[in-house]
């Protein structure tokens, strides 16, 4: 389990990394964050907050669009499951 702040710290480290980052590192952080939230709807809402806070990191990293796409993909999957 991870808090929002811990997850954002991981994202910041990934965005600041000088080497190419694998999306799996971001996925692990996302799932750790979501594991503390019960219910598909609540997890989808948590991803909205996480995405907003990730944008606020204001990074010029080439990894940012990929990270945001990954967050959107997770949210879409959760929304499909909650229908």
Image (tube, rainbow, N blue to C red):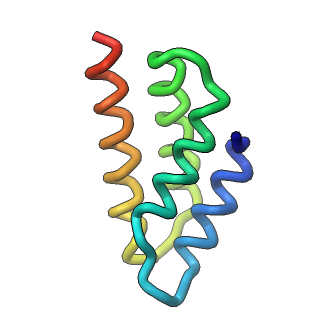
In this picture, is 28 found above or below 63?
above
- Residue 28 position, x and y percent, is 53, 53
| Foreground residue among 49 and 80 | 80
Number of numbered labels in the structure image: 0
> Which one is in front, 33 or 65?
33
Left or right, 68 with respect to 38, comes to left
Locate the N terminus and report the quarter of the image it occupies.
Answer: top right
Q: Residue at x 69, y 61 (%)?
A: 9
In percent of width and height, residue 82 lies at: 34, 14
Q: Position of residue 4 (x, y in %)?
A: 68, 43
Give the quadrant of residue 17: bottom right
Residue at horizontal 53%, vertical 65%?
58
Q: Residue furthest bottom?
A: 18
Q: Is residue 42 above or below residue 59?
A: above
The image quadrant of residue 36 is: top right
Q: Position of residue 26 (x, y in %)?
A: 49, 59
Left or right, 79 with reference to 14: left
Residue shown at 46% from the left, 19% from the top: 40
Q: Quadrant of the C terminus?
A: top left
- In the rendered view, would you say 11 is above or below 48? below
């Amino acid at each position: 389990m991870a808090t929002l702040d811990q997850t954002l710290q991981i994202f910041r480290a990934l965005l600041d990394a000088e080497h190419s980052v694998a999306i799996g590192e971001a996925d692990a952080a996302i799932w750790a964050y979501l594991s503390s939230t019960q219910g598909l709807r609540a997890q989808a809402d948590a991803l909205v907050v996480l995405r907003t806070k990730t944008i606020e990191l204001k990074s010029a990293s080439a990894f940012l669009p990929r990270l945001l796409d990954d967050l959107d993909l997770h949210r879409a999957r959760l929304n499909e499951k909650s229908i």
